[in-house]
Amino acid sequence: MSYGLVCQQCKEPIQLDASLVNLAPGAYDMIAATLPPSSILTTQQQATDPERTGSSHSKSTWQRTKSPSLSSTSHSPRAHSKQTLRGSPLPNESFIVLQDSVIRSIPPQPGSPRANHSASGSRGDFGTVSSAVATKATETEPESPSPLSHHLRSTARLFNLLSTRTDIDHPLCAECVQILLTNLRKQLEETKKERDGYTAFEKEVRKEREREAQGMTREEAEKKIEKWRIDEAQVIEQITEAEREREQLDEELRILEQDEKALEAEEAEFWKMHNDHLLAREHQVTQLSTLRAAYAADAATLDRLERTNVYNDAFCIGHDGAFGTINGLRLGRVPSVPVEWAEINAAWGQTLLLLHTIVRKLDYTFENYRLVPMGSFSRIEKTTGDKASYELYGSGDLHFGRLLHNRRFDIAMVAFLDCLKHLVDHIRSQDPSIKFPHPISKDKIGDVSVKLQFNQEEAWTKSLRHVLLALKICLKWATSGANG
C-alpha cells in the first residue's frame, strides 16, 4: 500500500514494507533508546520542526556525500520517465507535511467526530456545522490520533532517525539501496586494505623495538662497525671506479657526438646534393617532355600544312544554283535572281586576283595585257597599241554614260578571256594530259559569249560559270606537287 512517499535519490514513488507500516510504538522507542542523547534530540527536533531541520540537513548531507554512481541513478531513463505528480511535496520537504496531506485525503471513520461533522453538514444544517467547528476550535483537549496517522508519524520519525545516522537521506528505493550497498562495500574493502597496511607496519615497528631492546656487546658493536668500514671502503672504491668509467664513457660519448655531428653534416650535404640532382633531373625531364610535345605538335602542323592547299582556301570556287561562286560571291545575274552589282564587281575582283596569282606562281607573263587586281574596282591595262585601261566592273545606273561604261566592261571581260586562253595554252604545252571542258575562242567560252550587251543574262551567267571552272582547273594544276 503506497502513501505517497518517493525515493530521495531518483524521485520514484516507493511502497513501504508491511513491517514498517505495522511498526509498534514500543519498537520505535526501543530503537531511539539505543542511540546517544544527542541523536535522540536531533531526531525529536526533526520530528517537531522538519521544515527547518530536516530540509537543510538532508539536502546538505545528500549533496555532500552523493557519489557518481548513485547520482547517475537520478538521471536514469527509469527515473527520468517517472515524474512526480503535481502538488506532491518536494524531496526536501518535511514528512510531517506529507503525512498531513495524506491524512486529509483519507476518508473519515464511521463514528468519529469528523464523520459526525460531515453527516451533520450533509443534512443541510449550516448553523450546526458552524457551531460545531467553533466548539472544536475552542477545545483544549486534543483528540486521539487515528491508527493510520500514528503509523505515518512513526515511519516519518524512523526515516528522520535513519537520515541523522547516515550520510544519505531516506527513504530509498530498492535500486538506490543496491547502489548504496555497492559503494559501501567498496569503501569497506578499501578500509580493510588500509587496516592490513597499518597492521603490517605496526608489526615491523614492534620488531625494530624488540631488536633495539635486546642490545649487543662492545665487541659485537666494534666488529659490526669494522665490517661497515670495510663495506664503506669497498663501496667508495666501487664509486671511484664507477666515476673513472663514467669519465671515460663521457669522453667516448663526446667523441661519438662529434662524429655524429660530422656524419649529420655530411648526410645533410649528401641529401642536398641528391635533391639538387633530382631537381635538375626533373627539370631536364620536363624540358625534354616539352620539347617532344612541341616537336610532335610542329610535326602535326607541318603535315597538315603539307596536305593543305592554301590557294584552295584563299580562292574557294563553287556554285550556287545557276551561279558560279568564288569565295561565296555570285558571278552573274538572272532575271529571277537580280544579284547586286556590288557583289558581281567583288566577284570579278576575286577572279582577276586568282588569275594574277596563278600567273605569278607559274612565272608567266602576258604579252598584250597587264592585270591590275583592285577588289571591286579591278581593271585590265593594254600594254600594246593605244595602251588603254578597261574597267572590270559594271554599274546599274540609268544614264547615257552607262552604254559607254558597259562597252568598256565588255572589252575588259573579252580581254580577261583572252588572257585566260593564253594561260590555258601554256598549261597544255606543259602538260598535254590536262583537259579543259570548254574551248575558248575570241569572246566565247564554250558556246556562249562573255559580253553583257546584246546578250541574255542567263547566257552571260553561264559563260562566267565556265570561266570559273577553267580557272579552278588551272589553279589545281599550278598548285600540284609536280609543279610546286
Image (cartoon, rainbow, N blue to C red):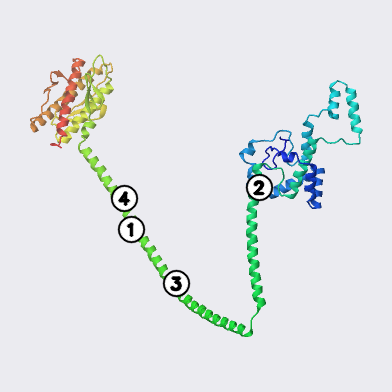
Of callouts 4 and 1, the N-terminal one: 1
Of callouts 3 and 4, the N-terminal one: 3
Q: Is residue 210 above or below residue 296?
A: below
Residue 277, labelled with which disc? 1
Of callouts 3 and 1, the N-terminal one: 3
**Residue of label 3:** 253
Give the spatial CA distance, label 3 vs label 1: 35 Å
Residue shown at the point (63%, 85%) measured from the top left = 218
Amino acid type for the residue under numbered disc 3: Leu
Of callouts 1 and 2, the N-terminal one: 2
Give the spatial CA distance, label 4 vs label 2: 77 Å
Of callouts 4 and 2, the N-terminal one: 2
Residue 286, labelled with which disc? 4
Residue 401, how many percent across, how many down?
25, 18
**Residue of label 2:** 180
Judged by depth in the image, the label closer to the viewer, 1 or 2, is: 2
Give the spatial CA distance, label 1 vs label 2: 74 Å
- Location of the C terminus (image quadrant): top left
Judged by depth in the image, the label closer to the viewer, 4 or 2, is: 2
Amino acid type for the residue under numbered disc 1: His
Amino acid type for the residue under numbered disc 4: Thr
